[in-house]
Image: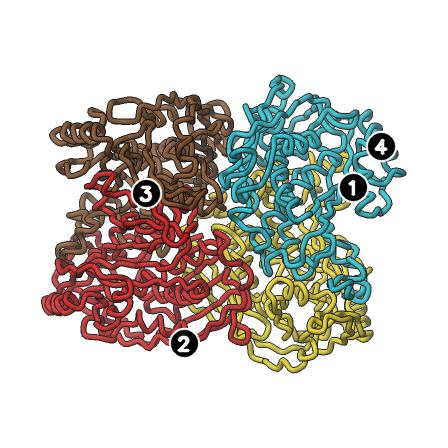
Chain colours: A brown, B red, C yellow, D cyan
Amino acid sequence: MSGNKIGKMFNVTTFGSSHGIALGAVVDGCPAGLEISNTDIQSELNNRRPGTSQITTSRKEKDEVKILSGLFRGKTDGTPIVAVVFNREMDSSAYENLRNNPRPGHGDYTWQARYGNYDYRGGGRGSGRTTIGQVIGGAVAKKVLDTLDIKVISHVTQVGIVRANKMEPDEIELNVKMNSVRCADPEAAPRMEALILHVKEQGESVGGVVETIVLNAPAGLGEPVFEKLDADIAGVLMGIGSVKGVEIGLGFKAAEIKGSQMNDEFYMDDQIIKTITNHAGGILGGISTGMPIIARMAVKPTPSISKMQKTVDLESMEDAEIIISGRHDPCICPRITTVAEASVSIVIADHLIRSGFINPVKL
Amino acid sequence: MSGNKIGKMFNVTTFGSSHGIALGAVVDGCPAGLEISNTDIQSELNNRRPGTSQITTSRKEKDEVKILSGLFRGKTDGTPIVAVVFNREMDSSAYENLRNNPRPGHGDYTWQARYGNYDYRGGGRGSGRTTIGQVIGGAVAKKVLDTLDIKVISHVTQVGIVRANKMEPDEIELNVKMNSVRCADPEAAPRMEALILHVKEQGESVGGVVETIVLNAPAGLGEPVFEKLDADIAGVLMGIGSVKGVEIGLGFKAAEIKGSQMNDEFYMDDQIIKTITNHAGGILGGISTGMPIIARMAVKPTPSISKMQKTVDLESMEDAEIIISGRHDPCICPRITTVAEASVSIVIADHLIRSGFINPVKL
Amino acid sequence: MSGNKIGKMFNVTTFGSSHGIALGAVVDGCPAGLEISNTDIQSELNNRRPGTSQITTSRKEKDEVKILSGLFRGKTDGTPIVAVVFNREMDSSAYENLRNNPRPGHGDYTWQARYGNYDYRGGGRGSGRTTIGQVIGGAVAKKVLDTLDIKVISHVTQVGIVRANKMEPDEIELNVKMNSVRCADPEAAPRMEALILHVKEQGESVGGVVETIVLNAPAGLGEPVFEKLDADIAGVLMGIGSVKGVEIGLGFKAAEIKGSQMNDEFYMDDQIIKTITNHAGGILGGISTGMPIIARMAVKPTPSISKMQKTVDLESMEDAEIIISGRHDPCICPRITTVAEASVSIVIADHLIRSGFINPVKL
Amino acid sequence: MSGNKIGKMFNVTTFGSSHGIALGAVVDGCPAGLEISNTDIQSELNNRRPGTSQITTSRKEKDEVKILSGLFRGKTDGTPIVAVVFNREMDSSAYENLRNNPRPGHGDYTWQARYGNYDYRGGGRGSGRTTIGQVIGGAVAKKVLDTLDIKVISHVTQVGIVRANKMEPDEIELNVKMNSVRCADPEAAPRMEALILHVKEQGESVGGVVETIVLNAPAGLGEPVFEKLDADIAGVLMGIGSVKGVEIGLGFKAAEIKGSQMNDEFYMDDQIIKTITNHAGGILGGISTGMPIIARMAVKPTPSISKMQKTVDLESMEDAEIIISGRHDPCICPRITTVAEASVSIVIADHLIRSGFINPVKL
């Protein structure tokens, strides 16, 4: 029990670090009989992979997945699915100067405080590269969701002060793959890309907002008091590195308004109970309403910037300075879309089983 | 496993509902040897209790705690601590008209979708009254935190569009008890109270923002990948009824700025590593830095309003209308401060044990 | 997490101690819609209750159950079911001489080693009286099992050197209530009773064997590698105080024989796959076969005997002697039958839900 | 949550199957700072490995371990330790005739009942080969135990009707490696070997008893009510394939005797509290006494025998016959010693952390 597992019935344990031999995940509790292929996982990993455009880090990794167990004749057999990605590019000399100087905004110092050591080579297990595990788990979860036609999609709604216009779910799904910033608003996307390139030139980074939407989730998902669907979603999203805030539905806007402005009134739509508005973001009392589930997360600017910063020297215990070189994403939002989709997909798959919508043993 | 438990090593299982016989909690995993009294728990329950001012519901409950087990000669003995509050006031006739008409903004409909029934009498277990269990657990957690001089304080920073000025921790602790709205800013507090009374007269409700601060938490608390300290805090705060958003440190502001504006630089302060700023809200890489931990939550306006609203009839499956009578808080923020403190205290106590700062068996 | 919970999906947390205010259980994860009454629980508690015959302790307790939450109009509503029994008879003066002298064969010393204190008054939470919690949980579990017509029955097969003859399940069910020793063999029962009364007169105690049988469990229950059905049954049975051994099917007899003598051959019986023999005790590869599940447990003689015994003084840390007075069961086997039934029923109910035979949320 | 994990704080998730690509384990919750090498794990795997003597299966596997993550400069870094063994020898044609005919005594049929399919190639994940995962986890656990000088040793005490004489712990440790049957009694060992070779010639198999001893465990290990040390040990041992019974201390002998014969009296030995006898097997009230912990397990004869057996055809659902060819251990006891050591080591490591004897985060 040291925080490397997500989910209860359908659960994903991840492992591996930035400069170790391999990263990967154990997906346990997936029902037998689900068709899944290398490609299903690889395509999600490709979405997460860096080096695919000018606005991401130039670290080149093929991130080829290898499934070690859990499949029998192309289907899950009910046993743990293990998939790994071996690290290729292993030059860690660029990180040598970080050995005793924790980087501001990174987990270096807190890992040192906790474990008595930290892997200065690219963040070790604290690296964003560990999200490979989540993405593997999310790829399997998505296949579970497919059986009920549930979709999870993510897009970037804000980069710095550039905000996208509100779009409809089908537009989002269509547009989000048409630009490298993964913004569904074709008007805002180029301005976001320009801003990212601008801060990159400055040796700077910039934050943003990512939104994740779940379509077709049935009403009735989520536990009642502590493991509410929104609580679990908030937990996994806040657990993604660089995320500093999470909203469901109207989020912080709800703080400003009155009850009559917030409440979503019910109506019958062809024998199905729906709400006229969806300010609640698809969740009431911690349980899904059947309307789209909508979550947004605030992403901080990547802490690795090339400007000189103040730090301390852990050996001499004196003030020090640091300049970070190496390759980094100037804005991590586009790549976080994949991780957010994976994380939310795992939560939904878990609750589908926990709530009896999917048999826990076999499809 | 149905979502009534919070915490892993130090954990709290809550039970009971709005109009049942009793509500309470089982606190398990509390080390032996901790002095604790009825008063320690009762005083927290009194903070949560309604009916203490004009701006809360007029439901009168004494909420007297009774400890059933777990103590031996005034100290915890390592066995489960069970404390209950018996419900007194049981008139549920006011709720009869809700029997088949789910209230907009409430969990009535989603509980129906999930369980096939819902307790229309004041929300049943979905009622805010179930937070009695959390507050009992939080009271025990606070005693654990006391042993390391760790404090958890909460205050209201926004009601509707009225925002409090930023205050220092010691001011907050001092001021927050001086007004019924639990706002630390003496200038904003009366304006918040006026706004709450105003919406109450309108038969309306209003949202707000509550901030929770943890002081003196050691560096090194929190798991690395999924059960990060911020993830766990976000999970429990989002799990409180009416919360629609959670921020750590700068939160959504972080989305707008650059890396150099966000990063907290390190410095040595008398052999202790600190950060000059605390934009991270005391958590980096999911692990505490030793700086104050700062979380904020967006609270939606109470869904119970006395205006006519559209709903459906679950029996006839046709559109319907509803007018909610009964007693309700026009703004739940002041009372949520106590629940937020309790929830975060439980998370911190749990991680203190999980991280080896406190012996899991005996003090 | 301190070992007061049993089960995962369907789980039971017990609390309370021998001389505290109350004992009881929280049953969580029970599906909504299950009819259950006070009587269902009370009748199981009555089976466990002492003072009902000459061969049990003379401690008189009414053990009246009070349900605090979890029911709505006579049915489970999906929220935690909490039931308690208040302790009545509270004279603990008989235990004063045990304050610093741990009783041989009891948990006094090990609790002291672990928690730094022990409740010398009748064993505190280490007392057999804490099994009230299990029996409450088991009563609810049995109602879950009823929905699939699954029965769990226990009987005493050995007391000291007196062994019962092998009986058929329906005989066991019928006969076991016809004598105070709960032995299904009408020939052995009186000899067992005589032996118990004999050792009681000597100020002694005696051990025995209890067998628990599960009828009508479907094939397919149990996890594959670590949470096998037999592993979980062995865990809960060994966890009952005084149990020193657990067998499934042939048990230790299997060590002596050859493969051809052990293997249960398959055959078709009216389109159902059965085994000719049932040496495996209904479990293969950790998963139920559909044949009766058969477990036996070795119960040690009650450690409380009235003979002088050597012990140590925890204050002076010197050798000491102890004579235990008070009321004790000379043979705990008859009362363990109820606890074993409850424990196994909880395991089966949990696996029925985990394996998808019963919906986790509502019936 | 599907039963592939053992342990709570220190936990081991295993994966992989008999004829898949790889088998292995994720060891999570191991404190940082523990020195561990490939050799530490490989030497345990070599103990488990078949093909090393005449009395085991002739399947040849090198079982070379590869550590994928969790180490940094030769020490654990607090992140999940993942180690795998790739399967080499993959001819599964010998199993083709088992495709629809479940083998008596094996898990084939119950896996089919549960998952709708089973891996007929050598038992799939139900194969004894999956214990590679446990052994990897046990190797890491043993390194944790080393820091407190705790030893776990296993030996064979019975094969069929051949019983070993009782030996002292240091004799056991010394003698057990001197014969292929892993029996500490030099007089019984050759007779056991002869018996095994004899049944092998007959195309038969034979059962036996394995004993596992824990030396130097401190008093105070184990939870009080449900996750007792003996309950957890019984759970993991009963969870090993082919185990049908578990005893602690006197075990089933305790059923026959009186309290005065069973109770272990206390005495002071150089300021340490000990018991004169150790009939309890080192555990009282579920918590360790500080005396040696002694567990025994009954191992059934290997179900794979070369005699014709009755079975059913899963396709035609008619009676059928089966003759099993392939390579099998005629007596699995010698190889189970390694798995039992691993399993118990994991339980002890877990409880050492849960009970506060070892810091959960770093050594």
> For the residues carrying marks 4 and 2, which lies nearer the camera in this image?
2
What residue lies at 45% left-to-right and 56% top-to-bottom? B350
What residue lies at 50% left-to-right and 62% top-to-bottom? B30
Callout 2: residue from which chain? B
Side (left or right) of B288 relative to C129: left
Image coordinates of residue D338 in percent, x first then y, are: 70, 37
Is residue B248 among what the camera can see? no
Image coordinates of residue D70 in percent, x first then y, are: 51, 35
For label 2, the residue is B39
Mark 4–mark 3 distance (CA, rounded to whole Å) = 61 Å
Mark 1–mark 4 distance (CA, rounded to whole Å) = 23 Å
Callout 1: residue from which chain? D
Mark 3–mark 1 distance (CA, rounded to whole Å) = 51 Å
Residue D231's place in the image compared with A299, above or below, is: below
For label 4, the residue is D195
Could you say whether the residue bearing mark 4 is in a helix, strand or loop? helix
Could you say whether the residue bearing mark 3 is in a helix, strand or loop? helix
The reply to whether label 4 and label 3 mark residues of one chain is: no
For label 3, the residue is A237
Query: N-terminal of the two: label 1 or label 4?
Result: 1
